[in-house]
Image (spheres, grey):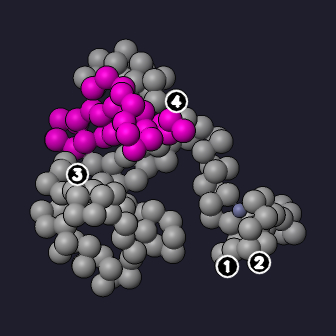
Amino acid sequence: MECSCCGNDRENVVALRCHDDVKICPGCIDWLHHQTGQADSTPILSVTDMPAAIAFYEQAGFSTHEYEPGGGYTFVAYDDENVFDLALDGKSGCYLLVPDVDAWHARLVAGGITATDPDNYEYGMREFEFIDPSGNSVRVGTPTG
Ligand SMILES: [Zn+2]
């Protein structure tokens, strides 16, 4: 079925509640959600054996995409939508995708939270990290592209 927003032919489109003739795909819903300025959170699970973790989640019906083959970071998707990430020997926590990483950093630091300085990374994100009192990592980022 054709997405009313991007025009692409998609298997999974949903109609708006108020206009059932307008049907949009998950990618366009995601885009629309980001336009509201709300943070989008992706959990990050710490794993000790990446190949075993990938085999496990693929057996469970997810698809996986390694950031670098054999590397320490893997994206886990269900039905083409990223649902969580795996970090080898990393800290468990989450990744918050926000519209303005510098505003988020300024607000947290003004509130007395210790955080790394925002920096641009080669994977296309400007991000910083803070650690909660229990050791959970919260990474906050905005795409640079
Ligand atoms: Zn679309």
Q: Which residue is mark 3?
A: 92
Upstream in the sequence, badge 1 or badge 4?
1
Mark 2 Cβ and ligand 1 under 8 Å apart: no
* Residue range corresponding to the magenta coloring: 116-145
Instruction: Identify whether 90 is placed above or below 139.
Output: below
Q: Residue at x 67, y 57 (%)?
A: 28
In front: label 4 or label 3 = 4
SS assignment at label 4: loop
Q: Quadrant of ligand 1?
A: bottom right
Q: Which residue is mark 4?
A: 100
Upstream in the sequence, badge 4 or badge 3?
3
Q: Are marks 2 and 3 in contact (CB under 8 Å)?
A: no
**Direction from residue 16 to residue 84 in the image, left or right:** left
Q: Residues within 10 Å of mark 2 (few under 14, many from 20)?
A: some
Q: Which residue is mark 2?
A: 1
The residue under label 4 is which amino acid type? Asp
Alpha-carbon distance for marks 1 and 4?
A: 32 Å
Q: Residue at x 84, y 69 (%)?
A: 20
Alpha-carbon distance for marks 2 and 3?
A: 38 Å
Alpha-carbon distance for marks 3 and 1?
A: 33 Å
Residue 80 coordinates in the image, percent (x, y) = 51, 70
Residue 144 coordinates in the image, percent (x, y) = 50, 35
In which image quadrant can residue 145 be found? top right
SS assignment at label 2: loop
In which image quadrant can residue 67 be found? bottom left
In front: label 3 or label 1 = 1
